[in-house]
Image (cartoon, helix red, strand yellow):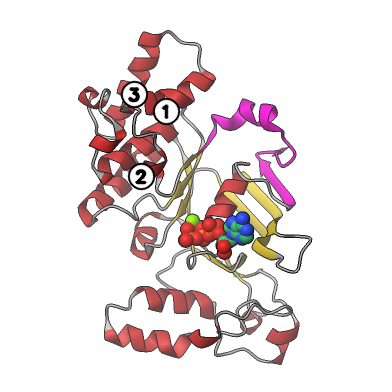
Amino acid sequence: MNLIEAVALSKCYNEKTKKKVYAVKDVDLAIRKGEILGLVGESGCGKSTLGKMLLQLEKSTGGQVFYGDENISKYDFNKMRTIRNNMQMIFQNSSNLFNPYYTVKQIIMEPINNYSKDSEADKEQRIIDILSKVGLDSSYLERYGNQLSGGQRQRVGIARALVLKPEFVVCDEVVSSVDYEIRNQILKLLIDLKEEFGLTYLFISHDLSAVKKICDRVVVMYMGNIMEILPSIEENIKHPYTKALLAASLDINPRNRQKKKILFRENEEQIIPENGCIFQNRCLYSNEKCKNNKPKLENTEDNHFVACHLYKK
Ligand SMILES: Nc1ncnc2c1ncn2[C@@H]1O[C@H](COP(=O)(O)OP(=O)(O)OP(=O)(O)O)[C@@H](O)[C@H]1O
Ligand SMILES: [Mg+2]
Protein backbone atom coordinates (compact mmCIF):
# COMPACT_ATOMS: atom_id res chain seq x y z
CA MET A 1 0.00 0.00 0.00
CA ASN A 2 1.28 3.45 -0.87
CA LEU A 3 1.37 6.02 1.89
CA ILE A 4 2.65 8.97 -0.14
CA GLU A 5 2.67 9.39 -3.86
CA ALA A 6 4.13 12.09 -6.07
CA VAL A 7 2.82 12.44 -9.60
CA ALA A 8 4.81 14.51 -12.11
CA LEU A 9 5.98 16.65 -9.21
CA SER A 10 8.10 19.65 -10.17
CA LYS A 11 9.75 22.66 -8.63
CA CYS A 12 10.91 25.31 -11.02
CA TYR A 13 12.73 28.47 -10.00
CA ASN A 14 12.58 31.66 -12.05
CA GLU A 15 9.90 30.04 -14.16
CA LYS A 16 9.20 33.08 -16.27
CA THR A 17 12.76 34.15 -16.91
CA LYS A 18 15.76 32.95 -18.88
CA LYS A 19 17.32 31.67 -15.66
CA LYS A 20 14.57 29.05 -15.32
CA VAL A 21 15.89 26.07 -13.42
CA TYR A 22 14.22 22.90 -12.24
CA ALA A 23 15.20 21.77 -8.76
CA VAL A 24 12.82 18.83 -9.25
CA LYS A 25 11.40 17.76 -12.60
CA ASP A 26 8.35 15.57 -13.25
CA VAL A 27 9.04 13.17 -10.43
CA ASP A 28 6.77 10.12 -10.10
CA LEU A 29 7.34 8.32 -6.85
CA ALA A 30 5.35 6.09 -4.53
CA ILE A 31 6.43 5.51 -0.95
CA ARG A 32 5.04 2.32 0.54
CA LYS A 33 3.66 2.19 4.02
CA GLY A 34 6.27 0.87 6.44
CA GLU A 35 9.31 1.14 4.21
CA ILE A 36 12.53 3.07 4.53
CA LEU A 37 13.07 4.63 1.15
CA GLY A 38 16.57 6.01 0.56
CA LEU A 39 17.08 9.13 -1.55
CA VAL A 40 20.58 9.77 -2.84
CA GLY A 41 22.33 12.00 -5.36
CA GLU A 42 24.92 14.74 -5.51
CA SER A 43 24.57 17.99 -3.62
CA GLY A 44 22.02 20.27 -5.25
CA CYS A 45 20.18 17.51 -7.14
CA GLY A 46 16.88 18.34 -5.42
CA LYS A 47 16.62 15.86 -2.54
CA SER A 48 15.60 18.30 0.17
CA THR A 49 13.27 20.12 -2.20
CA LEU A 50 11.51 16.86 -3.07
CA GLY A 51 11.24 15.89 0.60
CA LYS A 52 9.77 19.26 1.53
CA MET A 53 7.28 19.19 -1.34
CA LEU A 54 6.00 15.77 -0.23
CA LEU A 55 5.19 17.37 3.10
CA GLN A 56 3.89 20.58 1.52
CA LEU A 57 6.56 22.51 3.36
CA GLU A 58 7.55 23.84 -0.01
CA LYS A 59 5.04 24.57 -2.75
CA SER A 60 5.43 22.65 -5.97
CA THR A 61 5.16 24.41 -9.33
CA GLY A 62 3.68 21.35 -11.04
CA GLY A 63 2.27 17.92 -10.32
CA GLN A 64 0.51 16.42 -7.34
CA VAL A 65 1.11 14.80 -3.98
CA PHE A 66 -1.23 12.17 -2.56
CA TYR A 67 -1.36 11.20 1.09
CA GLY A 68 -3.27 7.93 0.96
CA ASP A 69 -6.17 8.77 -1.35
CA GLU A 70 -6.12 12.47 -0.61
CA ASN A 71 -4.64 14.91 -3.06
CA ILE A 72 -2.93 17.30 -0.67
CA SER A 73 -1.25 19.45 -3.34
CA LYS A 74 -3.86 22.14 -3.14
CA TYR A 75 -4.30 22.11 0.61
CA ASP A 76 -3.91 25.53 2.14
CA PHE A 77 -2.15 26.13 5.44
CA ASN A 78 -5.24 25.48 7.57
CA LYS A 79 -6.25 22.31 5.75
CA MET A 80 -2.66 21.08 5.92
CA ARG A 81 -2.65 21.71 9.65
CA THR A 82 -5.24 18.98 10.10
CA ILE A 83 -2.81 16.34 8.82
CA ARG A 84 0.55 17.97 9.56
CA ASN A 85 0.98 15.95 12.76
CA ASN A 86 1.05 12.79 10.62
CA MET A 87 3.91 13.99 8.44
CA GLN A 88 7.09 15.39 9.86
CA MET A 89 10.59 16.27 8.78
CA ILE A 90 13.88 15.95 10.58
CA PHE A 91 15.68 18.81 8.91
CA GLN A 92 19.11 18.87 7.41
CA ASN A 93 21.26 20.63 10.06
CA SER A 94 18.21 20.58 12.28
CA SER A 95 20.37 21.43 15.24
CA ASN A 96 21.17 24.84 13.71
CA LEU A 97 17.49 25.54 13.37
CA PHE A 98 16.86 25.40 17.09
CA ASN A 99 16.65 28.67 18.88
CA PRO A 100 19.79 28.61 21.07
CA TYR A 101 17.87 30.38 23.82
CA TYR A 102 15.27 27.61 23.97
CA THR A 103 15.57 24.73 26.35
CA VAL A 104 15.11 21.15 25.12
CA LYS A 105 11.67 21.22 26.72
CA GLN A 106 10.70 24.36 24.80
CA ILE A 107 12.06 22.97 21.54
CA ILE A 108 9.95 19.81 21.79
CA MET A 109 6.97 21.64 23.28
CA GLU A 110 6.52 23.80 20.18
CA PRO A 111 4.87 21.19 17.94
CA ILE A 112 2.86 19.82 20.88
CA ASN A 113 1.42 23.23 21.60
CA ASN A 114 0.24 23.46 18.02
CA TYR A 115 -1.81 20.28 18.32
CA SER A 116 -2.64 19.54 21.90
CA LYS A 117 -4.76 21.05 24.60
CA ASP A 118 -3.43 18.69 27.27
CA SER A 119 -2.43 20.00 30.67
CA GLU A 120 1.13 21.27 31.13
CA ALA A 121 1.94 18.23 33.25
CA ASP A 122 0.70 15.84 30.55
CA LYS A 123 2.61 17.67 27.87
CA GLU A 124 5.78 17.55 29.93
CA GLN A 125 5.27 13.83 30.45
CA ARG A 126 5.01 13.36 26.69
CA ILE A 127 8.30 15.16 26.28
CA ILE A 128 9.96 13.02 28.94
CA ASP A 129 8.61 9.88 27.24
CA ILE A 130 9.86 10.79 23.79
CA LEU A 131 13.23 11.91 25.19
CA SER A 132 13.66 8.53 26.80
CA LYS A 133 12.88 6.89 23.44
CA VAL A 134 15.77 8.79 21.88
CA GLY A 135 18.04 7.93 24.78
CA LEU A 136 18.00 11.19 26.75
CA ASP A 137 16.76 11.39 30.33
CA SER A 138 14.71 14.12 31.97
CA SER A 139 17.84 15.95 33.13
CA TYR A 140 18.01 17.31 29.56
CA LEU A 141 14.68 19.13 29.79
CA GLU A 142 16.09 22.41 31.02
CA ARG A 143 19.29 22.38 28.99
CA TYR A 144 19.73 24.85 26.18
CA GLY A 145 20.29 23.76 22.59
CA ASN A 146 23.78 25.21 22.57
CA GLN A 147 24.75 23.14 25.61
CA LEU A 148 24.28 19.89 23.71
CA SER A 149 26.68 17.87 21.59
CA GLY A 150 25.96 17.31 17.90
CA GLY A 151 24.64 13.82 18.57
CA GLN A 152 22.43 15.02 21.40
CA ARG A 153 21.03 17.83 19.27
CA GLN A 154 20.25 15.34 16.54
CA ARG A 155 18.38 13.21 19.08
CA VAL A 156 16.40 16.25 20.18
CA GLY A 157 15.58 16.91 16.52
CA ILE A 158 14.32 13.35 16.18
CA ALA A 159 12.31 13.64 19.40
CA ARG A 160 10.74 16.86 18.15
CA ALA A 161 9.72 15.25 14.87
CA LEU A 162 8.32 12.13 16.53
CA VAL A 163 6.55 13.60 19.53
CA LEU A 164 3.29 13.93 17.60
CA LYS A 165 3.49 10.26 16.56
CA PRO A 166 3.61 10.87 12.81
CA GLU A 167 3.13 8.17 10.19
CA PHE A 168 5.61 9.50 7.71
CA VAL A 169 8.95 11.16 8.43
CA VAL A 170 11.39 12.73 6.00
CA CYS A 171 14.87 12.28 7.51
CA ASP A 172 17.10 14.79 5.76
CA GLU A 173 20.82 14.09 6.32
CA VAL A 174 20.22 13.07 9.91
CA VAL A 175 23.61 11.40 10.27
CA SER A 176 25.76 13.70 8.19
CA SER A 177 27.14 15.89 10.96
CA VAL A 178 27.88 13.31 13.64
CA ASP A 179 30.81 10.99 14.17
CA TYR A 180 30.81 7.30 13.33
CA GLU A 181 29.73 5.93 16.68
CA ILE A 182 26.87 8.41 17.14
CA ARG A 183 25.86 7.80 13.54
CA ASN A 184 25.43 4.09 14.23
CA GLN A 185 23.47 4.83 17.39
CA ILE A 186 21.15 7.19 15.52
CA LEU A 187 20.60 4.68 12.70
CA LYS A 188 19.72 2.02 15.23
CA LEU A 189 17.42 4.47 16.98
CA LEU A 190 15.62 5.27 13.73
CA ILE A 191 15.07 1.58 13.06
CA ASP A 192 13.86 0.91 16.62
CA LEU A 193 11.45 3.85 16.49
CA LYS A 194 10.19 2.74 13.11
CA GLU A 195 9.42 -0.72 14.47
CA GLU A 196 7.82 0.65 17.60
CA PHE A 197 5.65 3.30 15.98
CA GLY A 198 5.11 1.71 12.56
CA LEU A 199 6.77 4.62 10.76
CA THR A 200 7.57 5.16 7.11
CA TYR A 201 10.75 7.08 6.26
CA LEU A 202 12.16 8.92 3.33
CA PHE A 203 15.84 8.74 4.23
CA ILE A 204 17.85 11.41 2.41
CA SER A 205 21.58 10.91 2.74
CA HIS A 206 25.01 11.39 1.22
CA ASP A 207 26.17 8.49 3.33
CA LEU A 208 25.69 5.55 1.01
CA SER A 209 26.81 3.05 3.63
CA ALA A 210 24.04 4.30 5.94
CA VAL A 211 21.61 3.92 3.03
CA LYS A 212 22.85 0.37 2.44
CA LYS A 213 22.41 -0.39 6.09
CA ILE A 214 18.85 0.72 6.65
CA CYS A 215 16.96 1.29 3.40
CA ASP A 216 14.49 -1.12 1.79
CA ARG A 217 14.70 0.62 -1.60
CA VAL A 218 16.75 3.46 -2.99
CA VAL A 219 15.89 6.36 -5.30
CA VAL A 220 18.75 7.94 -7.22
CA MET A 221 18.33 11.56 -8.36
CA TYR A 222 20.37 13.62 -10.76
CA MET A 223 19.63 17.29 -11.44
CA GLY A 224 16.04 17.06 -10.32
CA ASN A 225 15.27 13.82 -12.16
CA ILE A 226 14.92 10.27 -10.89
CA MET A 227 17.47 8.09 -12.72
CA GLU A 228 16.92 4.79 -10.96
CA ILE A 229 14.83 3.19 -8.23
CA LEU A 230 16.38 -0.03 -7.03
CA PRO A 231 16.03 -2.56 -4.23
CA SER A 232 19.59 -2.09 -2.99
CA ILE A 233 22.47 0.23 -3.71
CA GLU A 234 24.81 -2.75 -3.33
CA GLU A 235 23.96 -4.97 -6.26
CA ASN A 236 22.50 -5.09 -9.75
CA ILE A 237 23.00 -1.38 -10.31
CA LYS A 238 22.01 -0.41 -13.82
CA HIS A 239 22.13 3.31 -14.46
CA PRO A 240 25.58 4.68 -15.41
CA TYR A 241 24.97 7.59 -13.06
CA THR A 242 24.24 5.35 -10.07
CA LYS A 243 27.42 3.39 -10.82
CA ALA A 244 29.41 6.59 -10.97
CA LEU A 245 27.88 7.93 -7.79
CA LEU A 246 28.73 4.75 -5.97
CA ALA A 247 32.28 4.68 -7.31
CA ALA A 248 32.77 8.33 -6.37
CA SER A 249 31.57 7.66 -2.85
CA LEU A 250 34.24 5.06 -2.36
CA ASP A 251 37.15 7.15 -3.49
CA ILE A 252 39.37 6.69 -0.43
CA ASN A 253 40.42 3.58 -2.28
CA PRO A 254 42.65 4.41 -5.30
CA ARG A 255 41.26 1.51 -7.34
CA ASN A 256 37.80 2.97 -7.01
CA ARG A 257 39.04 6.44 -7.79
CA GLN A 258 40.19 4.97 -11.06
CA LYS A 259 36.72 3.58 -11.60
CA LYS A 260 35.25 6.99 -10.95
CA LYS A 261 37.34 8.43 -13.77
CA ILE A 262 36.14 5.74 -16.11
CA LEU A 263 32.50 6.37 -15.36
CA PHE A 264 32.31 10.14 -15.01
CA ARG A 265 33.19 12.71 -17.63
CA GLU A 266 33.50 15.34 -14.96
CA ASN A 267 34.72 18.30 -16.96
CA GLU A 268 31.39 18.62 -18.73
CA GLU A 269 29.22 18.61 -15.69
CA GLN A 270 28.12 22.25 -15.89
CA ILE A 271 26.21 21.98 -19.15
CA ILE A 272 22.51 21.31 -18.69
CA PRO A 273 21.18 19.59 -21.81
CA GLU A 274 17.94 21.04 -23.14
CA ASN A 275 16.84 17.85 -24.83
CA GLY A 276 17.40 14.19 -24.27
CA CYS A 277 18.92 12.55 -21.23
CA ILE A 278 19.94 14.95 -18.47
CA PHE A 279 23.08 12.87 -17.83
CA GLN A 280 24.26 12.64 -21.46
CA ASN A 281 27.20 15.03 -21.11
CA ARG A 282 28.75 13.08 -18.28
CA CYS A 283 27.87 9.60 -19.46
CA LEU A 284 30.40 7.47 -21.31
CA TYR A 285 27.71 5.47 -23.04
CA SER A 286 25.66 8.31 -24.47
CA ASN A 287 24.70 8.12 -28.14
CA GLU A 288 22.47 9.98 -30.59
CA LYS A 289 19.30 8.70 -29.01
CA CYS A 290 20.37 10.05 -25.63
CA LYS A 291 20.84 13.49 -27.16
CA ASN A 292 17.36 13.62 -28.61
CA ASN A 293 15.03 11.57 -26.46
CA LYS A 294 14.67 11.83 -22.75
CA PRO A 295 14.50 8.28 -21.38
CA LYS A 296 11.44 7.55 -19.23
CA LEU A 297 11.72 5.82 -15.88
CA GLU A 298 10.77 2.27 -16.79
CA ASN A 299 10.26 -0.95 -14.93
CA THR A 300 13.08 -3.24 -16.13
CA GLU A 301 12.60 -6.04 -13.66
CA ASP A 302 10.99 -6.70 -10.30
CA ASN A 303 11.20 -3.64 -8.09
CA HIS A 304 13.68 -1.97 -10.39
CA PHE A 305 13.12 1.18 -12.46
CA VAL A 306 15.69 2.79 -14.72
CA ALA A 307 15.62 5.92 -16.87
CA CYS A 308 18.23 4.99 -19.47
CA HIS A 309 18.11 4.00 -23.13
CA LEU A 310 20.66 1.26 -22.47
CA TYR A 311 18.01 -0.67 -20.59
CA LYS A 312 15.03 -0.33 -22.83
CA LYS A 313 13.25 -3.64 -23.10
N1 LIG B 1 15.62 30.25 -4.60
C1 LIG B 1 16.24 29.49 -5.49
N2 LIG B 1 16.47 29.92 -6.75
C2 LIG B 1 17.08 29.14 -7.66
N3 LIG B 1 17.49 27.90 -7.42
C3 LIG B 1 17.31 27.41 -6.18
C4 LIG B 1 16.67 28.17 -5.15
N4 LIG B 1 16.63 27.41 -4.04
C5 LIG B 1 17.21 26.23 -4.36
N5 LIG B 1 17.62 26.22 -5.63
C6 LIG B 1 18.29 25.12 -6.34
O1 LIG B 1 17.54 23.95 -6.20
C7 LIG B 1 18.39 22.82 -6.31
C8 LIG B 1 18.00 21.76 -5.34
O2 LIG B 1 18.34 22.12 -4.02
P1 LIG B 1 18.20 21.09 -2.81
O3 LIG B 1 18.51 21.82 -1.56
O4 LIG B 1 16.88 20.43 -2.90
O5 LIG B 1 19.34 20.03 -3.13
P2 LIG B 1 19.87 18.81 -2.26
O6 LIG B 1 19.90 17.63 -3.15
O7 LIG B 1 19.08 18.71 -1.00
O8 LIG B 1 21.37 19.24 -1.94
P3 LIG B 1 22.28 18.90 -0.65
O9 LIG B 1 22.70 17.47 -0.83
O10 LIG B 1 23.41 19.84 -0.77
O11 LIG B 1 21.45 19.11 0.56
C9 LIG B 1 19.81 23.32 -6.12
O12 LIG B 1 20.50 23.19 -7.32
C10 LIG B 1 19.63 24.78 -5.74
O13 LIG B 1 20.64 25.56 -6.28
MG1 LIG C 1 19.53 18.90 0.99
Q: Is residue 65 magenta?
A: yes
Query: Which residue is rendered at x = 33% and y = 42% of the image?
Result: 154
Instruction: Provide the residue designation for mark 2.
Output: 191
Query: Which residue is rendered at x = 44% and y = 65% of the image?
Result: 232
Amino acid type, callout 1 = Val
Q: Check disc 1: other Cα within 10 Å, few if <14, some if 14-19, many if 20+.
A: some
Examine the rendering and report whether any part of residue 39 can be seen. no
Amino acid type, callout 3 = Lys
Disc sitting over residue 105 in the figure: 3
Q: Check disc 3: other Cα within 10 Å, few if <14, some if 14-19, many if 20+.
A: many
Earlier-in-chain disc, 2 versus 1 = 1
Identify whether 2 is placed above or below 297.
above
Disc sitting over residue 163 in the figure: 1
Left or right of residue 17, residue 217 in this image: left
Q: Residue furthest right?
A: 16
SS class, disc 3: helix
